[in-house]
Image (spheres, rainbow, N blue to C red):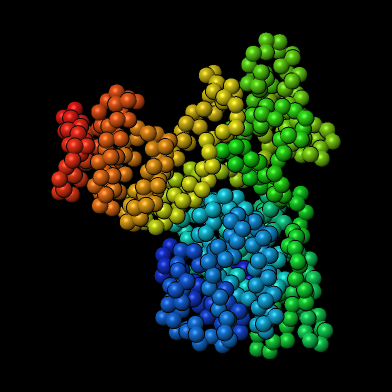
Amino acid sequence: MIHTNSVDSIRVGDHLCGFYQNRQQLWGLAIPFLQRGLENGEKCLYVAEESSLQGMQNALQQQGTSVQACPAQGQLLLLTAEDTCLQSGVFSPEALIGTLLRILQEAVTEGYRGLRMAMEMSWALRWASSLAWLAEYESKLNCYFSQHPVTTLCLYNQRRFPEEVLLDVLRTHPLVALDQAIHANLYYLPPRIFLQQDKKEQFHLYLTNIGRGASLSRWSLEEPEPSTILRRGSGQALRPFGFAQGRLCLGQGLGHRLQELPSGVRWPISSAAAGRWRIYCLGELRVYRPDGTLVNWDMTKGATRKVKTLFAYLLEREKAGATAERLADLLWPNQKDTRKGLARLYHTVHCLRLALEPQLSTGRASRYVLYEGDRYFLALSDDSWIDVVAFDRLCHRGEDLARLGEYDDALACYLGAEDLYRGDFLADIPLVYAERVDDDWCWSRRYWLREMYLKLLLYLAELYLKRDAVSESLSYWQRALAMDPCCEEAHRGMMRAFYQAGRRDALVRQYSLCTDLLHREENRAPDVRTAQLYRELMMTLRQPFDGAQDKAQDTARTGNQS
């Protein structure tokens, strides 16, 4: 059985993850972790997202730790995600690691024994495109932070994050904090193995861990190669702080100083080792290679739209692939000469291969566009991140949470899904390729995702109205009506919002607008539910009617009778 230990067993350099489902579990993980750091003379940083900074202070005080009574002024930093993770409005693993290393450097300069950091990770859902890079960030921390006097606890709300994200969290943290105990993580993968996505190495590592799991209480990081970065005042070299290096004795004074920190964070593992592609299909097609560089479709001296369409089509076909004849017919539907169509296809395939691998010497050396049997295949990593998949997961998770009455968690998931939807599915693929009657590979999915997004806006509007956030609610219903002016659910929602705000005149105008739109666009009266809701709201407000209101009331009665 894998050994478990208390929070006192945490060593400098440890990188832990913790999972929680409510505020009580969150405090149970974070507060003992921070208390030990304050007692040990470390500078402590807490990055809040779900909880307020004042709430964290109150929780610490309830557990006997007064923020004002910390040994040194400024020993405890309480920050938000905007202060640390998203200073530029976008997430970059290297940028965040650089920010945290600078905080560490300041702590060491101020005389602290190191930095102890706990971070609520739900900020990643507000900028859900961050999910594409989150696992890379967590994996890289194991290289950077294991070499410095910094101890990290990453806190994940188990209700909010999709399971594939939570599985990545397990694979990138050597230790797991669970039920106030510290567990060695049998499923941890060192950075080289995790980012390379080498299934053979993963399998053999798991076998090794299982074999030694009965006696091992914590795993070795294995990477990177040890380097001396900490020194005593006498100049004696110390070993880096890693999981296999032993405990740093914090009772021996403040003699440890950081010799140097990198001015620019650089990944010590070759980018060729990384295997996860990031593909954004909502809006314009954007593809990021495993090393983080953006694919440039214009550099191949080919027809850009055809190259992008070829990539998108093969991505949709997945393991089924597509024959050369089918691809030629897709890209040149009016080409009657099959030989000419195939010749053009071969050139386009070559351009796609070069776009994905600019240093490619020959087309046959391509690792990602393969030709086997009589079919072309797109051979990307199995766990490549695709925004459409993440969008679908977050929408359904939010719906499940809302059904359970967990509205705050549902809102976080819905906002994450909203952030991912940057436009219609493959919006820059020309209609001549997307609207194929004989091969509907794009259009139906585009329409289905658009309908999902419309429902998402309605759900968000409803959740904000439950929170008495009328302005935000009205904003989402207006966006829904911009997509579908005849969406009666949105009209009814706006009427309820105006009623809740006491805006009787606006309520009347909204119903009149609804009736006029439905008559003009669909030649019908409002639904019975819409007319009945209007009558009920107007009766409740109990104010005299003017002429416009009388007309709206007549329309409501007519709609109700229909």
Task: Give the x, y percent position of residue 193.
Answer: 70, 55
Residue at 74% in and 74% down: 240
Viewer-closest of 380 and 454: 454
Q: Quadrant of the C terminus?
A: top left
* Left or right: 278 in relation to 472: right
In the rendered image, the vertical position of residue 118 relative to residue 328, given as above or below:
below
- All told, the count of numbered labels is 0
Q: Position of residue 486 (x, y in %)?
A: 35, 32
Q: Quadrant of residue 264?
A: bottom right
Residue furthest top in the image = 336
Q: Residue furthest bottom?
A: 252
Image quadrant where one finds the N terminus = bottom right
Q: Is residue 320 visible?
A: no
Residue 155 locus on image (x, y percent): 52, 65
189 to 1, vertically: above or below: above
Residue projecting furthest to the front: 547
* Residue toward you, 384 or 493: 493
Which residue is located at x 47 percent, y 59 percent? Answer: 158
Tell me the residue at 46%/51% (across/down): 415
Task: Give coordinates of residue 339: x percent, y percent.
Answer: 74, 13
For residue 530, which quarter of the picture? Answer: top left
* Identity of the residue drawn at 78% across and 77% down: 259
Residue 237, above or below 94:
below
Q: Nearer the viewer, residue 510 or 14?
A: 510
Would you say 266 lies left or right of 425 here? right
The reply to whether residue 519 is in sight is yes
